Amino acid sequence: MITVVGTGRVGSTLASQLAAEELDDITLIDIVKGLPQGEALDISHMATQYAADVELVGSNDYEAMAGSDLVIVVAGLARRPDMTRMDLLNKNTSIIKQVSEQIKQHAPNSKVMMITNPMDVMTYVALKATGFPANRVFGMGGMLDSSRYRNLLAKMLGVSYASVHGMVIGEHGESMTPLASRTSVNGIPLKELLDQDKMKEAVEKTRKIAAEVIALKGATFYAPAQGVVKMVESIVRDKKCVYPVCTYLTGQYGVSDVCIGVPVVLGKNGVERVIEVILEGVEKESFLKGVQSIKAAVSSIQI
Ligand code: NAI
């Protein structure tokens, strides 16, 4: 069973995408009376049309998550156009601490996937507050950032999205790190197809596009939801996909005691392996800037 805590825009959208993929039964939890119950009914009616035989239950009671294999946490405040992800820090820290206590109590064997922003910091909070092993607490951000990066590149190059392979690692925030030096068009290095200025432009646009979407429609939810679905699929089906995932580092990339996005192997045990790639020049600079920013945020909160 998969539990989604927080059934607002992102939570309900990802639950509907998970149901359509028939990945598992889903429990929805939110503090707003009626909301998770209503979403469960609506999504269940949608699943019927997909002939996706999954059960959906909505509840305002955290006990409903008992027996979950995976708890997806997307409860809390969302970013407004004038806010950075870090502005959300204090309010969401207390929500995530409270939710983590409930997960520890009701679903002690579950894996936890953090979505709430600032996601890297909230992943760290959940890791510490649950006391779960690090492979079982991780976050989604890089999947979304990578989709934006690949989308921009595909349009610049006039090729299919499916042909662009590249990852965005690092902080899910201002210092996100698109790995331009490792990006390819079906194996052809990006630098053979785009000049340096265009590559830089793609990197810069990737960093800014989230704020643009939020300014236009107030939130982002379809793309983040699909990032979650891809990760859940790799876990539930034990596919061992290599994805950019926020995970706890213990010396890899030269850093420790921080949760940040890096390539990992994602399977039934959660984060099964961290893959280390050598970072050089601006990519290393940007990654380490992200580490500093996350560590500064962590040291400013009470966990
Ligand atoms: P939303 O405001 O639509 O939904 C949040 C929901 O959380 C609400 O229904 C609220 O009642 C619920 N909630 C609040 N406290 C709760 C608690 N203690 N227990 C259970 N539910 C609780 O917000 P939206 O747009 O769905 O965003 C949710 C979070 O996801 C935000 O922090 C946002 O910044 C983040 N986000 C992260 C992304 C990523 O890539 N990691 C992408 C998009 C959003």
Image (tube, rainbow, N blue to C red):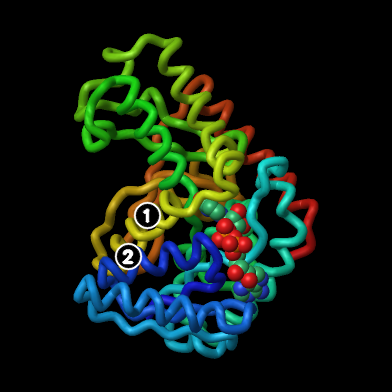
Q: Which residue position holds label 1? A: 226
Query: Does residue 273 appear in the picture of this structure?
Result: yes
In the picture, measured across the screen, residue 289 lies left or right of residue 231, that is right
Queried on whether the Cβ of the residue with tag 1 lies below 8 angstroms from ligand 1, the answer reads no
Question: Is 169 above or below relative to 69?
Answer: above
| Quadrant of image for the N terminus | bottom left
- Labelled disc at residue 155: none
Determine which of the numbered discs, if any, sits on residue 235 in the image.
Answer: 2
| In the image: residue 302, left or right of residue 185 | right
For the C terminus, which image quadrant? bottom right
Which quarter of the figure has residue 97?
Answer: bottom right
At label 2, the amino acid type is Ile
Distance from Cα at disc 1 to Cα at disc 2: 14 Å
Q: Is residue 264 above or below residue 67?
A: above
Q: Position of residue 252 (x, y in %)?
A: 49, 44
Q: Residue at the location (71% across, 62% down)?
A: 93
Residue shown at 42% from the left, 14% from the top: 198
| x and y, in percent, of residue 243 in the image | 36, 48
**Which residue is at the front of the view, 173 or 110?**
173
- Residue flagged by tag 1: what amino acid is it? Gln
| Nearer the camera: disc 1 or disc 2 | 1
* Location of residue 255 by image quarter: top right
Placement of 81 over or under 90, stated as above or below: above
Q: Earlier in the sequence, mark 1 or mark 2?
A: 1
Depth order, front residue of 7/91? 7
Dot 2: what SS? helix
Residue visible at 48% across and 73% down? 4
Residue 132: where, in percent of width, then height? Answer: 54, 72
Task: Name the residue nearer the viewer: 157 or 8.
Answer: 8
Q: x%, y% of residue 207?
A: 54, 32
Image vertical order of residue 187 relative to residue 292, above or below: above
Task: Count residues near mark 1 (Cα–Cα under 10 Å), then give few for <14, some for 14-19, many for 20+.
Answer: some
